[in-house]
Image (spheres, rainbow, N blue to C red):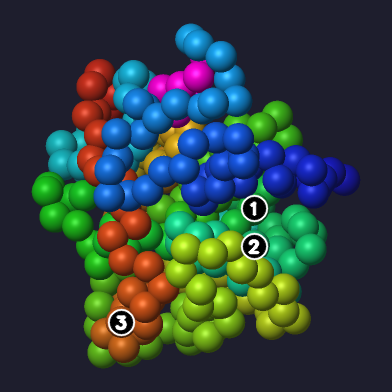
Amino acid sequence: MRQHLSLAFLMGFAVVSGQVEAADPAWNYTDQNWGALTSSATPPPSNYPYAECTIGTTQTPVDIGTTKTERILNGLTVNWQPFPGDYFNTGYGIQVQPYAGDLNAGTLKIGKDSYDLIQLHVHEPAEHAVNGALYSAEMHFVHARVDGRLAVLGVFVTLANASNSEFQKILDNMPNTPGVKTHNKSSVVINLKKLLPTGNGRFFTYSGSLTTPPCSAGVGWYIYETPLAISPGQYDQLKSFYFGNNRQLQPLNTRTLVKNK
């Protein structure tokens, strides 16, 4: 039987959505020179807790422009389950995670490897670009393997006449206290599968990092080509929580973006 991750293990990944330890320096999206921020709790030369944000060579997000198309053997299988949500305003964005740390929310299988679903959070506008253009928003479904390796499934968000009922559920249950960490540990069940786009299943993949401090590398990124549609009204409601909470584009350097056939 597959063992689920513990609550303590979950808390170790709080940085994925913008949370950091109290001793770490405050950061924001207006000034993204995060690598220059220093911590008074750590003596030099280790007092730059976000140095990877500046000196890292495999940072995220990137522009999905020129890609290499090939058959990817390690395909994606989404095995998520509905769960009672903790609707969490992190102070940097809106996030949904399993209630009370219960990680029985299903998995993402990449080839033979299984990653537990930890949480979903949203950026406005999108973080990844497509030939220089940004979608209206981007959802990040964060997963962790038992050894700690992270895999993020990204879904672009576009605008259409039809609304998405599951996205509306997130908006309606999210505490609207921008800049303040606030939980709503409700019994409202969320089905994140309803936030996946319909399409040909094509995705882009590359090795990257967290998009918030400390910008840790070694994150596997998988981004669906087809976006999810929400209504203009839902988009306006999203922006009532946060807007402009996207990291600037990072150089691809020697990495190769691959799209599956």
Task: Say what amino acid the circle numbered 3 marks.
Answer: Asp
Range drawn in magenta:
46-52
Mark 3 and mark 1: span between their CA atoms?
Answer: 26 Å
Q: Quadrant of the N terminus?
A: top right
Q: Secondary structure at mark 1?
A: strand
Task: Say what amino acid the circle numbered 1 marks.
Answer: Ile
Magenta stretch holds residue 39: no
- The reply to whether dot 1 and dot 2 touch (C-beta < 8 Å) is yes
**Residue 257 against residue 54 in the figure, above or below:** below
Say if residue 54 shows up in the picture: yes
Task: Say what amino acid the circle numbered 2 marks.
Answer: Gln
Mark 1 lies on residue: 118
Q: Earlier in the sequence, mark 3 or mark 2?
A: 2
Res 236 label: 3
Mark 2 lies on residue: 97
Q: Looking at this view, name the residue that lies furthest to the front.
A: 40
Give me the residue at 79% from left, 63% from top: 100
**Closer to the eye: label 3 or 2:** 3
- The reply to whether dot 3 and dot 2 touch (C-beta < 8 Å) is no
Looking at the rendering, which quadrant does residue 185 occupy?
A: bottom right
